[in-house]
Each structure stands twice: as C-alpha cells, then as structure tokens.
Image (spheres, rainbow, N blue to C red):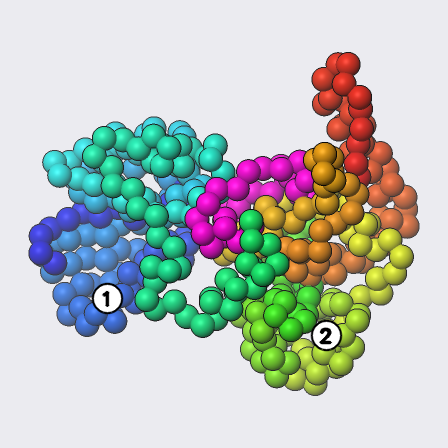
Amino acid sequence: MQSRHRILCTREFQVSIADSVHKLLKDQIEQLGLSGFYSVQQAKIIGANGTEFIFAGLHHNITSIKSMEGVTRCWVEEAETCAELSWSILVPTIRAEGSEIWVSFNPREKTDPTYRRFVESPPPGALVVQLNWQDNEWFPLELSMEKDYAYSVDPEAASWVWGGECRRMSNAQVLRGRCVVEPFEIDPKWDGPYQGADFGFAADPSTLVRCYVAGRVLYISHESYGIGIELDNLPALYDEIPGARKLTTRADNSRPETISHLCRHGYPEFRACEKGAGSVEDGVEYLRSFERIVIHQRCKHVEEESRLWSFKQNSAGDVLPDLIDKHNHCWDAIRYALEPLVKTLAGAGILAYAKQQLSEAAAKKKPEGEVRKTHI
C-alpha cells in the first residue's frame, strides 16, 4: 500500500490457482479490513496504487517467468521442493532495482538445493531466520497436541518436523527413494479410489487417506489427520475429505465399536479389514513394489510419515526386517485401503516374486568383494 510493487508468488509446482497462496492473501486482506484497497480477482490481486500480485509455478512455467519484467518482490513458498534448475533461472530474473526474493520453507535434507543455496552458503546480503512454533504467539491447541505427541514418540523425528532440523536419508526408511510430492489431477482411468482409516488410541492420531493405483504408480490424493479426536468427532474429521461418506472405507478390525458408530453416523460403507497372519508384511511389500508413490502436496502428514516410517536397526546399524511402530498411521490407513489388491497379489504369489526381485536388486548394488546381505 505504501508503494507500487509487482509481486510474484511462486512455488515449484502449481497446477491451479488453488495450489497457490492466493486464498491466504485474500483471507489476510479481509481480516485486515483492506478489501477497499485491493481487488481480488480470480488469478490476480490488484492494489489501488497499481500493486499487482501474480501467481505461477516454477516447474511448468520457468520460461515465461524468465521473461517477466519489473518484479520487485518474489515470494517462493514451500521452497524445499524447488530444483536447482529453477533457482538458477529464477534468481537472475528478479533484477529490478531494489528487488527482493523471499523464501519460506521447511528444511528436509541438507543436500536439497534450497537448503544448500540459502542456509549452508547464503548469498551476500541474505537475511536467514529460523522460525519455529515457539515464535508463534497464536500457536493453536490442536497443533500443540500434535507437537507434544511427536516429541513423545520420537524426539529425533520431531526435531525435524517441529524443530526445523534437517533429516538424513536412511537405509532403514521403509519407502526410501520411492516417494515424491507433486500436485496432480485424478485421471478417471486410474484404479480407485481406495479409502482407508486408522483409529487413534488415546493420544495417537486418527487418519483417513484416499489413494489410486495406475500401473506401478501409487497416487495419494487426500488425507485427514487429528490427534485426541473423540469418537463423536470422528465423522467431522473424516468429512475433511470431499465425498468421504460415499466411498467404501476399510479400517482396523480391532475397533468394531468405532466402525459401528461411524456406520450409524453417516458412513454406511465402513468395513473392517480381515487382516490375518502376514498381512502387515504383505501390505508393506506391496507398497514397496511400486516404482513411484506420488503424494499430493496437501497430504502433509503422509509426506512426513513417508520420510519417518522405518525398519528397526541393531547397534551395528544393520537394517532388520521388523518395523518400528511409529510414524505409520497414514500408511496403515493406506494398507487397509489397498487390502483387496494386496490379498489378490499375495494369493497369486506375486508378492513373493516381488520380494525376490527386491532382494536380487539390492544384492547387485553391493560393491565387489563386499558381503551381500539383503533385509526384506
């Protein structure tokens, strides 16, 4: 409002305006009583003094962004996913006199281009600030409960999710190297939707997750997630996913009273999984058999668990075949959702074949002369 600016709001992936910070800015304008100054349009926001907010994704629009003129402020949100190519083109593009680039992100690995560029080796004149939940005077009770739960079950993982620390990739990660976070549009040709739920116990989270299968690619499209959710409030939590009541939902069979309650309160298609001996192992191997698991960017907890869900390790660091019972609530819901497919493949012996292929592939990666050991 004080001076005219051309402000580019961007991120690595933006399929539609709904993926951008457009709504966030719109809400802030209304809360601050500035609706008389700013005109909120479908894809732009224009100020009475000519200030202009424009929205674009880097990955698919880097050439057009390269040709933009007069950008005085560039805000890159969720910048942890930005590729080095995007940075190498974007940074020289913002060259108007007095222009600035604002970068906001949650650190992942130290090897990520954004972390290396702006934290490990920040450019001259950069202002680097680490902000955490302690700095948020409006930190809500719901998030405080989620934070406390995370620190109670795994302090090291919580230091990444809540403390802003980087997390190293580990060979013990169940889904190591398979998961990517990308926006996507649901293709009607995909197999699905499949929907699964995991019920929280005491402080454990309750989850509902929707997914699709396209060949050897698994797509995770929606999630709902809440900690300390009372039984009466479960339907409202699950209603966060559009159309959730209309789909068959498979859930943990150890909570028949919860399934019965949901069926009586608007979720008639809730069903108990059959489970049984070896069902967990088969479900895990089915997930590991996908070449790619694409997680929509709105599924924040699925993404977190994809990095934290791990096998046990002994004191020597060897990966063991047993799962750590942490960071698996979303993935348990996904396993339940896909149970019919897992049972079909297990019955046909395909999962056993997949295990053999994974074992042989791991053995081939070992350097010559090294003892070949594979943990499934």
Q: Distance between the residues labelled 1 and 2?
A: 41 Å
Label at residue 364 = none
Return the residue at label 2: 269
- Picture layout, residue 46 above or below residue 356: below
Compared across the picture, whether 145 is left or right of 202 comes to left
Q: Is mark 2 on a helix, strand or loop?
A: loop
The answer to whether residue 247 is visible is no
- Residue 65: x percent and y percent? 30, 37
- Quadrant containing the C terminus is top right
Label at residue 29 = 1
Tell me which amino acid carries mark 2: Glu
Q: Earlier in the sequence, mark 1 or mark 2?
A: 1
Question: Which residue is located at x 78 percent, y 52 percent?
Answer: 283
- Picture layout, residue 336 above or below residue 83: below
Compared across the picture, whether 30 is left or right of 249 comes to left
- Picture layout, residue 239 above or below residue 325: below
